[in-house]
Image (cartoon, rainbow, N blue to C red):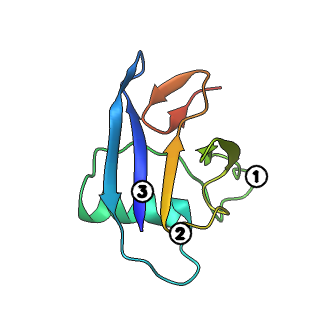
Amino acid sequence: MKLNIERHDGTRSTGVETYDVPDSPGLTVLDAVLWIREHHDPSIAVRFSCRSANACKECLAMIDGERTYMCTYRAVDEVTVKALPKNIVRDLVTGS
């Protein structure tokens, strides 16, 4: 599958980067982002707290134009992910 990630330096968009990610059953956008960080680009900033008590909901992003969680959105074919439009810290990370 192809994952398009809009990169951001905190003040402006620095462009969209496209990555090829091996498809696997049940692959989520968060899984794909983490795979990219591990295998291609460790500089991608993303925030998540899966399985942490009272800390869920940190992976909220704009995915294919829809505000949703990266951990629940299935990564199939080609997906575009961007940070929420307010308080962007870097890449897919937003502040409160």
> Which of 10/51 is in front?
10
Q: Quadrant of residue 44?
A: top left
Numbered label attached to residue 54: 1
In primary-sequence order, the first of circles 3 and 2 is 3
- Give the secondary structure at mark 2: loop
Residue at the spot 43% in from the left edge and 77% down from the top edge: 23
Tell me where residue 8 appears, x and y as whole percent. Answer: 39, 29
Closer to the chain start, of discs 2 and 1, is 1
Left or right: 47 in relation to 10: right
**SS assignment at label 3:** strand
Whole-angstrom CA distance, mark 2 to mark 1, is 29 Å
Report the residue that reaches farthest toward the front.
77
Relative to 91, say whether 23 is above or below: below
Residue 39, by quadrant, is: bottom left
Q: Nearer the viewer, residue 90 or 16?
A: 16
Based on the displayed image, in which of its 4 quarters is residue 20 positioned? bottom left
Q: Amino acid at mark 3?
A: Leu
Which residue appears farthest toward the right when viewing the image?
54
On the picture, is 36 further left or further right than 40? right
> At label 2, which amino acid type do we have?
Val
Residue 76, numbered label: 2
Q: Earlier in the sequence, mark 1 or mark 3?
A: 3
